[in-house]
Structure formats: structure tokens, C-alpha cells
Amino acid sequence: MYKGKSFAAIVPARAGSKGVRGKNRRLCAGKPLVSWTFEAARACPLLDGVYCSTDDPAVAHCAGRYGVEVLPRPKRLATDQAKMLGVILDVKQRLEKSGRKFDYLVLLQPTSPLRTANDISRAVKQIIRDNTASLASVSPVDLRAGLLVLGKKKNGALLTRSLAADCADVPRQQKPLLFRVDGAVYVWRNSFLTPHCVLNAPQSAVVLPKNHARDIDTPADFKACEELLNAQVQSGK
């Protein structure tokens, strides 16, 4: 609870995965990947509930060890084609049918294991401060890297536009800051979540450090995150 508003976290963790096989239950720095998100969520004092949507018995067992309630995911929402919005609405409807309606829902994807309880708290406070219906965590992108927008012409040729073109002669310190939606934390007002809402167009944002916003799509990403988590464990942080 924060400022009189209730917040529930959803941890979506299906069994299948294309990029990294069985990644949600795969050991990462000594424990299942999803455990890092369960720990962060349970350590956040502003969350009033934490729920895991899964079709994976191993993930469900792990959730139970952390005191996270499991909401079995329907088969239709456990495929590669299933949309995240459908998963979120399924959880929302299940909770409300059981008499549990929260003012805000917070999405915490297991593929961002370096996101902390403090990061979640900051997101919760930010959306209340901004008084918006949707928020996403973002992290900085280096404009000096020569970012390009890619598209295709009618003849199939690639069309490029440099985001840095207008700043070619601007000193490094004066170049504008760019950020990307990193997927570590999303927060939505309950009333915002309808079958026609757009999840990836946040009305406000909270900035996370680059390392906290690391996400996992490939085996190389998994290895990089595991190395960072091992370093944290060894340093006692």
C-alpha cells in the first residue's frame, strides 16, 4: 500500500521459451531465474500481493517456497503466440472474481533478474507522483553509438535515419539523453487495463541504472546476467 492505493505484482513465467530453453526455471547464480524476481517482489514493502501466472510445475513449486500465490495459466495463454496483455487480464479477472481488486497492477518479468525491490518501490512512488495511468522503467541509451531507425522502401531496400544526425557537431556533454523501455517494471492503473489498451506506450517513466535493467533474450544475455548476479552475491550486496 502506498498513499492509500493498493498494488499487486504479477510475475509471468510460462514453461516454454524459444531464446533460452526453460529459462524461468533454469539455475542462474545458484537458484532458478524466476527466484530473483520473487525475492525482489517479496522484499518490496509497497506491494500488497505477489502472484505468479505459470503453466510450469517447477516454477509453481519455486513460487510456493517464496510465499508467492500461483495462478495456473490457461493453455491458450502459454503459447509463443500468446500476448502479455491476455495474461495480465486473465490474472486481473481471476483476482477480482475472488474479491481481490487492486488499484494498480505491477508487471515483473523474470527476464530482468537484476531489478531490485528498491527499483519496484521507486516505480510505485513515481506513478502516484505523476498521477498517470501507466508507467514503465527505462534505462539510458548512448546516443554516441550512432543509433539508427530502420525501415523499408517499397522496393525492399533498407531506409535508415540516424537519431544522432542532428547532433553531429554538438559536444558530447550537450547531446540529448535517450532512453529505452527496458521491460524490468511496468505499472498500470487497474482501470487502464482493458482488452484494447496499449501496454508499451507508458505515460510516465522511472529511470533505472543500466545494470538493473539487463534483460534476457539469448544465452549470451543469460550468461551476462548470471555473472553480474554472482558478483553481487560474492560482494554481499
Image (cartoon, rainbow, N blue to C red):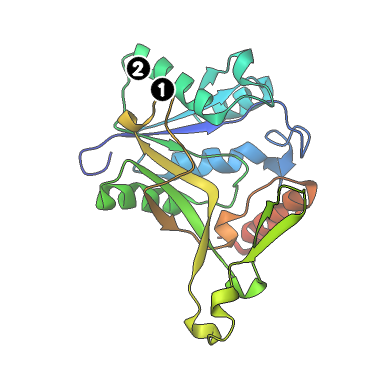
Local crowd size for mark 1, using a 10 Å CA cut-off: few (<14), some (14–19), many (≥20): some
* Residue most extreme to the left: 4
Do residues under tags 1 and 2 come within 8 Å of each other at their CB atoms? yes
Q: Quadrant of residue 149?
A: bottom right
54 left or right of 97 in image:
right
| Residue at x-position 77% and y-position 48% | 156
> Where 45 falls versus 56 (above or below)?
below
Which residue, given by chain and number where applicable, does mark 2 sit on? 96
Q: How many marks?
A: 2
- Left or right? Give the position of 116 relative to 159: left
Foreground residue, 59 or 127?
Answer: 127
Q: Amino acid at mark 1?
A: Lys
Q: Say which of 234 and 28 sits in front.
A: 28
Residue 187, percent from left and from top: 40, 41
**Seen in the image, is 127 located left or right of residue 12?**
left
* Location of mark 1 (residue): 92
Q: Position of residue 29 (x, y in %)?
A: 70, 49
Nearest the eye: 190 or 162: 162
Return the x and y of residue 159 as percentages of the image width and height.
70, 58
Measuring 59% from the left and 43% from the top, which residue is drawn there? 36
Q: Amino acid at mark 2?
A: Glu
Farthest front residue? 155
Which of 234/101 is in front?
101
